[in-house]
Amino acid sequence: MVDARYLRSRRAVKEALLVLLEKRQIAGIAMTELAREAGVSRSTLYAHFGNVQDVYAELVRDFYTSLRPLGVHLHCGDCSVQSSGARPFCVALRDAGPYLFLVKDAHFLPTLFEQLESGLVEGGALSAYLVPGLNEAQARAVFRFQMSGCYAVALSDAPAEEWARVQQALDTFIRGGLNALRAG
């Protein structure tokens, strides 16, 4: 069983990094500053994380684990419906809550790609793109293209009242493209 103080300290460090990301990008945040913001000693901080990037990477994983698996999303009939509380990537980006400055940070998407492609997070995202006729390099390119596009559009200034139609158009386009690749 994990000690409650351990969990509290770990949560405080991650919450502190979210606060600091409101002020600057990850590259400008030092461990000393993070420890101070979290209200923990540097030794406590280092007991949990080796560096600021480790905290950042865990926050990216935390964000992603709340999402609907990409394979499920790409094959759903109505992607606006939230299954078991999980949200599609674009919806989670638009309503990022405390993760807003994390997802807007320039390192977010590259960190997410690294984690997804190395298997650090569950979901097998790339497997949704492994269709007959595509090799792994091509599937990775299509995957990155789609995720980058969703990221850019979700964080754009698309009006809230238009978002449902924009999302539906994107989902239809993505599914149509994947179906065309499958048809070959």
Image (cartoon, rainbow, N blue to C red):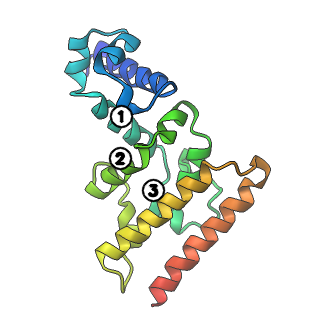
**Residue 69 bears which disc, if any?**
3
Q: Residue at x 49, y 65 (%)?
A: 146
Q: Position of residue 150 (x, y in %)?
A: 55, 58
Nearest-to-viewer mark from 1 and 3: 1
Instruction: Residue 88: tell me if it is visible.
Output: no
Q: Position of residue 80 (x, y in %)?
A: 65, 56
Q: Which numbered disc, 3 or 2, marks the residue that appears first in the sequence? A: 3
**Residue 56 bears which disc, if any?**
1
The quadrant of the image that shows the N terminus is top left
Q: Residue at x 35, y 46 (%)?
A: 111
Decide which of 110, 90 is in the foreground and name it: 110
Q: Is residue 26 left or right of residue 2?
A: right
**Residue 111 bears which disc, if any?**
2
Element on which disc 3 rests: loop
Amino acid at the residue labelled 2: Thr
The quadrant of the image that shows the C terminus is bottom left
Q: Which numbered disc, 1 or 3, marks the residue that appears first in the sequence? A: 1
Q: Quadrant of residue 31?
A: top left
Element on which disc 1 rests: helix
Element on which disc 2 rests: helix
